[in-house]
């Protein structure tokens, strides 16, 4: 008897790609709630982050990413196009 029907199909079906806007908003609300619970307000959180950034580069980097925005990541790709091609292609 063929037991493939019991495999369950694709486990990632419908879950690939970017999270939904609803999920992103939910995470944002949870983070804001946790910050307010610990620091009292968002303003006090940023003040504490600024104080920590005086002695800590990771805190400084995070503060600037909040303030200015994270820079776009670029990749320099260099390719040698003549590598591994037969000589008759150069003619």
Image (cartoon, rainbow, N blue to C red):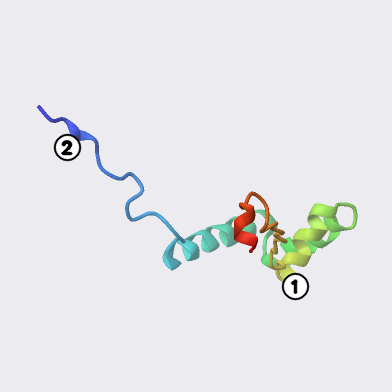
Q: Where in the figure is residue 65, as x and y percent of width and height?
A: 73, 65
Q: Residues within 10 Å of mark 2 (few under 14, many from 20)?
A: few
Q: Identify the residue at horizontal 49%, vertical 66% (top origin).
A: 25
Q: Residues within 10 Å of mark 1 (few under 14, many from 20)?
A: few
* 9 or 30: nearer the viewer: 9
Is residue 28 found left or right of 90 in the rendered image?
left
Residue 44 seen by the camera = no
Residue 33 is labelled as none
Q: Horizontal and vertical percent for residue 81?
A: 66, 59
What residue is rendered at 66% in x and 53% in y? 38
Residue bearing the label numbered 1: 68
Which residue occupies the foreground of this view, 11 or 68?
Answer: 11
Q: Nearer the viewer, mark 2 or mark 1?
A: 2
Element assignment for label 2 = helix
Q: Quadrant of residue 34?
A: bottom right
Instruction: Kindly identify which numbered label has been placed on residue 5.
Output: 2
Q: Is residue 80 left or right of residue 26?
A: right
* Element marked by disc 1: loop
Question: Which quarter of the figure has residue 31?
Answer: bottom right
Q: Position of residue 68 (x, y in %)?
A: 75, 72
Quarter residue 3 falls in: top left
Furthest toward the bottom, the residue is 68
**Would residue 33 be seen by someone viewing this image from the given angle?**
yes
Comes first in the chain, label 2 or label 1? 2
Residue that extends furthest to the right in the rendered view of this protein = 55
Q: Residue furthest left?
A: 1
């Amino acid at each position: 008897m063929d037991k493939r029907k019991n495999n369950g199909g694709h486990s990632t079906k419908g879950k690939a790609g970017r999270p939904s806007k609803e999920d992103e908003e939910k995470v944002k609300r949870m983070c804001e709630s946790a910050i307010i619970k610990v620091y009292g307000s968002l303003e006090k959180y940023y003040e504490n982050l600024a104080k920590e950034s005086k002695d800590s580069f990771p805190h400084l980097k995070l503060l600037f990413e909040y303030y200015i925005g994270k820079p776009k990541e670029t990749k320099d790709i260099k390719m040698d196009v003549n590598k591994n091609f037969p000589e008759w292609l150069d003619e």
